[in-house]
Image (cartoon, helix red, strand yellow):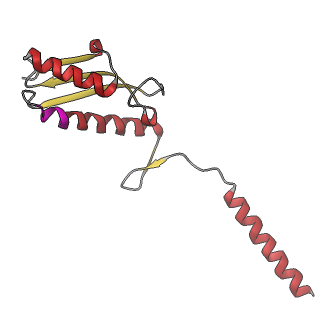
Amino acid sequence: MSGIGRKQWIVWLLLGLLLAVAALPVSHKKQKDDGMLFTETETADVQKTELEEKLEALLENVEGVGKVQVMIMTDEKKDSQGFYDSGGVKVTGVLISAEGGDNSVVVRDIQQAVMALFQVEAHKIKVMKMK
């Protein structure tokens, strides 16, 4: 009989350990491709950089725009009114330097594209001529 009691005791011990491990808090940190962990603020920075790169690639394919550099200003607070609100990043302003920035039609097209993509008012978008 003592053999059965010992086996049951071991089973209960293992079950308890399993429940203890399952009850441990889960970390909400995300992982970079190289395996390192990074915080939510760094996640917002990564998303901001990705947005800048995507907008640059998009604008460079528009006739008359030419080469561009984009800087996006963000507010990390979530706002359900914002179009791009994934991960707490909300676009609050955009600065664009474009080769075609001296052409008023190109500037207007760029502003309208940014307004449509990010729901940012025109006065928060600045397009400048690249030298």
Q: Position of residue 15 (x, y in %)?
A: 75, 68
Where residue 47 sits in the image (x, y, percent)?
Answer: 36, 38
Picture coordinates of residue 107 (x, y %)? 14, 18
Figure check: 42 above or below 130:
below
* Horizontal side, residue 74 vs residue 78: left or right: left
Residue at the spot 87% in from the left edge and 87% down from the top edge: 3
Give the left or right position of residue 59, taking residue 30 as reference: left
Q: Is residue 9 above or below residue 107?
A: below
Report the span colored magenta: 57-62
Q: Is residue 32 above or below residue 115?
A: below
Q: Indicate the quadrant where residue 14 lies.
A: bottom right
Question: Looking at the image, which residue sits at the far top?
Answer: 123
Residue 75 occupies which quadrant of the picture? top left
Which residue is more in the foreground, 90 or 7?
A: 90
Give the left or right position of residue 19, taking residue 69 as reference.
Answer: right
**Quadrant position of residue 102:** top left
Q: Where in the figure is residue 62, as x and y percent of width and height? A: 12, 32
Which residue sits at x=60%, y=50%?
Answer: 26
